[in-house]
Structures are given as structure tokens and as C-alpha cells.
Amino acid sequence: MPPPRDLKAAMSKAQTPLPAFIRDNARWLAAGFLLTFFSSFGQTFFIGLSGNAMRARFHLSGGEFGALYMVATLASASTLPMLGRLLDIMPGWKVARFCLPLLALACVLVTLAPNVVLLTVAIYMLRLFGQGMMTEIAFTETGRWFVANRGRAMSLVVPGQPAGTAVFPVVVVLIDSASGNWHVAWLCSAAVLLLIALPAIVGLMRVERIPNAIEAQANARRAVVRDWTRAEVVRDPILYLLLTGLLAPPFIATTVFFHQGYLTALRGYSPLTFAAAFPVMSVATVIFGFVCGHLVDRFGSLRLLPWFLAPLALASLAVALIAPVWGIYVFMLLLGISNGFTGTLLGALWPEVYGLANLGGIRAIIVSAMVLSTALGPGITGALIDRGIALPVQMVGMALWCVVASAFLAVAARAVARRNADWAAGRAIA
């Protein structure tokens, strides 16, 4: 359902030129960017860089390490909804103020863990406070700070993640090579979090953003979604229809990144193959994040929803069918396109579906489900690898998943649009 004409006019007035938008909102955009950037220390790609070293230290097979990772991430997913609710009852900077030190502690614990149990605890903390809460704070606060320009703002915050994937793999490989000890990179990560990330992010977020008069007008006209409670959301069948597609990107990307060592050995790639290809993904993510941000502000996230899995389906087929080393670059390019659309689209989607009043708690439920998918990915695929089903074969099934899920997303998008239109019409009559 297209936006009404007066809403389009108000939103058009609120669309300032990009340089001016960045200048006027640099504080909040920088805070969101840094949150997603430093979430890298809890992301699968970063943990996977030391995966072979961890496996060797504790004599774990690929399946055993995948199971360990799955347990830690499942525990993280179960904890995240409770922590995410804090964003509905206290300022985001206060939540960041305790999450960042705990993420730094997790980095140190990785190096000190004397057994598999404490290694699992360390990975649990990395996943909870890194991948989970850092991105949860960034997207929830950005979704609240910006309404008329939400797509544009998300497209400037989301690049923090690809920037991390472009920078950190090469830095970690260089540190490991220079020091000869994989612990050093983790200790450096803890120091960076405490000395740079913590003061910068908290300092930037302490000032709340107040929309100007034109934005406020556009925001009021765009308030055509009722505010759902968490209890209503978990009983909403449309949520689960949406999740059939929205869980595919984290599941598939996590699987490939987690098993990068396995895939490198399987196809005889050099150790730097994946590290060198990450910048390709990062550049594509940034470019297509901006494209998606423009499309979201123009058409709304619901109209884009049925199409955003197409690049991921092609990326999965690239891993499955292209054995030469250049196939990794094709995969990273397509995954970057997918990430650009996924990060920006999902950052803007939930306010359009469930409103803003309980966004922190609702997003925590969604992110928890996505974290759950990142737990299941390595565990399930690792077990299949141990049973002789190679990862390239599994990737064909993942491509098929994307195709089927796109049909479900189309149905869900139409249902949400009808629901919002009915609510807005009832509100106008009242």
C-alpha cells in the first residue's frame, strides 16, 4: 500500500542532502557505527579466525567445536531477550556502559580458559555482549532516533559491521604472524574495547537526539503502526512467517565463516584467501546498504522484503558450485550485496511492523531468534560434515531455502500492510 500523498510530502521535506544530514547527526550516526563496528569481537567471522587454534588446543573435531559453539550461542540467545528489555527502561548509553567492559572481559577469558567449559563461557559472553547486545543497542537506538530518515540512518550505521570484517581479519592474521601466539590478538581486542570503544561510544550517546520541526511533522504523519507489546508479538503468527526468511542470512553467513578453515583445507586455498576477500564483501555491503536505505525511505521496508534474499541464494550457489579460488570473491561480493540489504532493511522493518514503544524488548526477541540461527548453523552443518556431507553440497539446500522463504515473505509483507492500513483507517475514524 503506497504512502498517502501528504505523508510523501512531509517525508520529502525531511530529506535533507546527505552531507548536511551526516553533519547534523554525526554524533548519533557515529555512535551507531562504532557499536556495529566493535560488535565484530563477538561475531562469528572474528571467532572463526582463531577456530583452528582453539580446536587444536582442546583437541576438538569440527563437529565437536561446532557443538560447543552452538551451546554457547543458544545460551546467548536465551539470555538476550532479558537484557534487551533494558533498552525500554533506561538510556542506551547506560546499557552500553556495562556491555562493553563485559565484552572486553570475554576477550580476556578466551585466552585464559583452561578447559572446554570456560571456553564455552567465554564464547557465550562474546556472542551475548558482542553480536547480541552491541547490535541490539545500535539498531534500537537508531530506530528511535530517526523515523522520516530511518532508512538513510540505518545505511550509515550498518557499515560498521562490514568495516569490521574488512579490517579485523587482516589485522588478526598479521598480529598472529608477528607474535606467533593467537592469544595476543584477543588481548589487544580487550584493550581496544576498554580504552577506545567504551569512552567514545558512551560519550557520543549521552546526548539524546531531538527531531527538528519538519522531521516531527513527518514522524507524526508516519505513525500509522500501533505499538505492540512483547506478549502480543510472540503470539503473532506473522512473526513466524517473517522468521522463515529472516533467519536465513545469519544462518548461512555464520556457517560459511565458521567453517572457513574447513573450506580452505577442502579446496586447497591459501590461509589468507578468506582474509583477503573480506574487503570485497565490506565494500559491497556499504554500497548496497546505501541503495537499500534510499529504497526503504522511498517505498518502505515491506515492499522490499520479498526480494532481499535473492543475492543470498546466488551466494550459496557460488560456494556450492565454484571450486576455483575466485569463487570465494564471487561469494563475498554476493554476500556483501545481501548484507547491505539485510542490515539496513531489518533495522528499519520492525518499527513498521510492531511500532516504537516497546522496540527494545521486541527487537531483543527477534535478535535472539537470529542468534539462535547462528548457533544452529555451525552445529548442524558441522555434524553433517562429520557424517560425510560436504559443505558445498549443503549450500545447495540453503539456496533452495532462500527461494522458498521469499514466497513466505511476500505473503507476510502483504498481511502486515493490510493490518497497518486497517489500523490507520480505524485510528482516523476515531
Image (cartoon, rainbow, N blue to C red):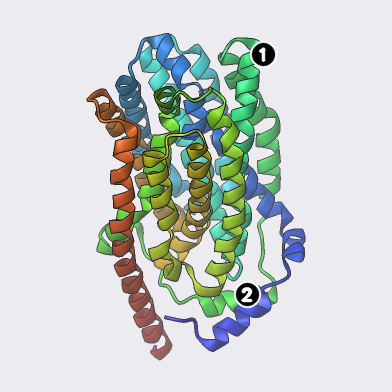
Say which residue appears at 50% left-offset and 44% top-offset. 330
SS type, badge 2: helix
**Image quarter in which the N terminus is found:** bottom left
Say which residue appears at 64% left-offset and 43% top-offset. 34
Q: Identify the image quadrant of residue 264.
A: top left
- Given residues 194 and 268, the one toward you in this image is 268
Say which residue appears at 41% left-offset and 28% top-offset. 263
SS type, badge 1: helix
Residue 187 as seen in the image, left or right of residue 264: right
**Image quarter in which the C terminus is found:** bottom left
Disc 1 residue type?
Ala
Task: Residue 9: give x, y in percent of width and height.
Answer: 61, 84
Task: Residue 277: give x, y in percent of width and height.
Answer: 57, 36
Is 353 located above or below residue 317 in the figure?
A: below
- Given residues 304 and 262, the one toward you in this image is 262
Asked if residue 399 can be seen in this view, the reply is yes
Is 291 located above or below residue 165 in the figure?
A: below
In space, the residues marked 2 and 1 are separated at their CA atoms by: 53 Å
**Label for residue 261?**
none
Is 14 located above or below residue 41 in the figure?
A: below
Residue 260 as seen in the image, left or right of residue 395: right
Asked if residue 232 can be seen in this view, the reply is no
**Label for residue 178?**
1
